[in-house]
Amino acid sequence: MSHVKMSEKELLFFKNIGAFMKDKRLQNKKTQSFVANVLGCTFQQIQKYEKASNFIGLWKLIAFCNKFNVNIGEVVSQALDNMYLPEELIKEGKIKVTTVSIKDIANDPTHRLDAIHWLDKQDENN
């Protein structure tokens, strides 16, 4: 078995899939053992999928999505868009976030609501 090095983008995709799986499992108050039983593997394997130290195959991901009533197309699309790992991406500086209150918007002369405006203002203040 040869080990092919994953690109950063591929690794991030599987980290997102793992984060999604963990989030969905916890939302449904299920254990790793429960999911392992559904997928026909061990709870240790589920741990590895959730941490992205092993990558889930398509067939098992389909089974997971079917069990939790989730559209696999949406999962893949959101994983590609990094929807499941915002905290990690924020720490790495790959996404920017800011908080804006209604008062901030009301006091801004433009009253703009678009994110880029407020991120630019945040950068100006730092």
Image (spheres, rainbow, N blue to C red):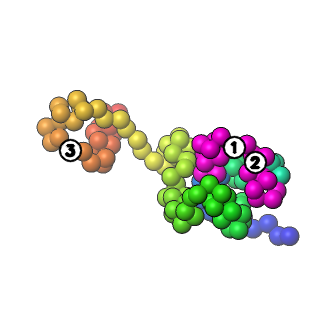
Q: Which residue is at 42% across, 44% downward?
A: 96
First in sequence: mark 1 or mark 3? Answer: 1
Please say if the residues under marks 3 and 2 sit with CB atoms less than 8 Å apart: no
Q: Is residue 120 visible?
A: no
**Judging from the image, what secondary structure is the residue with disc 2 in?**
helix
Contact (Cβ within 8 Å) of mark 1 with mark 3: no
Q: Secondary structure at mark 3?
A: loop
Q: Which residue is mark 3?
A: 112
Calculate the distance from the C-alpha at mark 3 to the C-alpha at mark 2. Answer: 47 Å
State the CA–CA distance, disc 1 to disc 3. 42 Å
Q: Name which residue lies at 73% across and 51% down.
A: 35
Would residue 82 be found to the left or right of residue 29 on screen? Answer: left
> Is 104 contained in the magenta span?
no
Q: Hey, which residue is sitting farthest left in the picture?
A: 109
For marks 2 and 1, give the CA distance. 6 Å
Q: Position of residue 32 (x, y in %)?
A: 75, 45
Residue sitting at x 63%, y 61%: 66
Residue marked by disc 2: 34
Relative to 66, 89 lies left or right = left
Q: Nearer the viewer, residue 109 or 67?
A: 67
> For the residue marked with disc 2, what is the amino acid?
Phe
Disc count in the image? 3
Residue 33 at x, y = what percent? 78, 46
Q: Please state if 37 lies on the left or on the right of 88 as rendered.
A: right
Q: Which residues are magenta?
A: 19-41
The three-letter code of the residue at mark 1 reads: Lys
Specify few, some or many for label 1: CA neighbours under 10 Å numbering under 14, 14-19, or 20 or more: few
Query: Which residue is nearer to you in this view: 23 or 114?
Result: 23
Which amino acid, by three-letter code, is at mark 3? Arg
Residue at the image point whose x is 45% and y is 47% from the top: 95
Residue 32 makes an appearance in the image? yes
Which residue in the structure is indicated by mark 1?
30
